[in-house]
Amino acid sequence: MRNPSPLARLLLRRQIAELAQEHTSIEQMRTRMAAERRAAGAAAIRAQEQERQRLAQDLHDEVNQALTAILLRLEATIQEAPPALQDELRDTKRLAGQAMEELLRLSRRLRPAVLDDHGLMPALHTQVRDFTEQTGIRATFHPQGSPTRLSPEQQLAIYRVTQEGLSNIAQHASAQRVRVELSFVGKTVLRISDDGSGFARRKSDRLGIEGMRERALLAGGHLSIWSEEGAGTRVELTI
Ligand SMILES: Nc1ncnc2c1ncn2[C@@H]1O[C@H](COP(=O)(O)OP(=O)(O)OP(=O)(O)O)[C@@H](O)[C@H]1O
Ligand SMILES: [Mg+2]
């Protein structure tokens, strides 16, 4: 092959330099876009938490008060009511009491005040225990190592990922056993494993798993999922 002339070599070198320059700009743009997307995701999650907090407060302060008033009035009415109506009124009071309990549970789910009041470990213990009580699926919590300092955002991420992980198991897995592990040996790892139906491909228009990923990123960690049809599912949040 003939040697290229000095001019051709110069042009070629210039073209290569231009291409390299373009490549660098594209990379910079991609990094900027990824950062912007992350910031938008973080802002959306923060806004969602604030909205949930407001809703929880309203439910707790307004609706709960109204229900308490109904319960008190019913109690007073029962005292005065003719015997024929007593049973009916007691039944109504029981239903109002159930509605109030349900409401307080909802309000707790919306805003994990339990995190502020008692800290992450008791909050997770309670979540796992409630899950078993509500679904009948045997779930156990296994902390490992001594808890390291986690920021409020990281604790919230662990709490919310556990919530969505357990809710997915209740909705989709038909599982018998569930293990929730939180290890502080080396990195902080939250692991939720079930022995249920597993899944090969997940529906793309759903928000649950996407939300867990966003929360993981926001907490400076990442989320991994292993699942196979018939072989259960494992969700891991590493921080
Ligand atoms: N533990 C699990 N066992 C079996 N299938 C699961 C499990 N977790 C997730 N899936 C499958 O992955 C899909 C996506 O889960 P994802 O949480 O993103 O959405 P979803 O639960 O269907 O809806 P939502 O947006 O209300 O969370 C589910 O529809 C289900 O098919
Ligand atoms: Mg879900």
Image (spheres, rainbow, N blue to C red):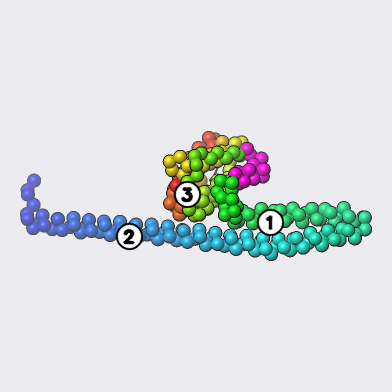
Q: What element carries label 1?
A: helix
Q: Distance between the residues labelled 3 and 1?
A: 33 Å
Locate residue 12, reporting x and y percent: 14, 55
- Sequence-first disc among 1 and 2: 2
- The disc label shown at residue 149, or none: 3
Which stretch is magenta? 125-138
Q: In which quarter of the image is residue 30?
A: bottom left
**On screen, residue 161 above or below 229:** below
Pointer 3: residues within 10 angstroms few (<14), some, or many (20+)?
few
The answer as to whether callout 3 falls within 8 Å of ligand 1 is no
Residue 131: say if magenta.
Answer: yes
Percent from the top left, x then y, of residue 152?
Answer: 50, 54
Q: What element carries label 2?
A: helix
Which tag is nearer the camera, tag 1 or tag 2? 1
Q: Which residue is drawn at 49% across and 39% down?
A: 145
* Coordinates of residue 218 in the picture (x, y in percent): 45, 54
Question: In this view of the protein, which residue sits in the foreground, 57 or 30?
Answer: 57
Q: Name the residue under label 2.
A: 29
Magenta stretch: dominant secondary structure: helix
134 is higher (above) or lower (below) than 22:
above
Question: Is there any visible trace of residue 211 in the rendered image?
Answer: no
Local crowd at mark 1 within 10 Å, few (<14), some, or many (≥20)? some
Specify whether 97 is left or right of 49: right
Dot 3 or dot 2, earlier in sequence:
2
At 77% from the left and 56% from the top, the residue drawn is 96
Per the image, label 3 sits on a secondary structure element best described as loop
Query: Is residue 73 at least partly visible in the picture?
Result: yes
Q: Disc 3 or 1, which lies upstream in sequence?
A: 1
Where does label 1 land, which residue? 103
- Residue 76 falls left or right of residue 220: right
Q: Which residue is drawn at 80% across and 55% down?
A: 93
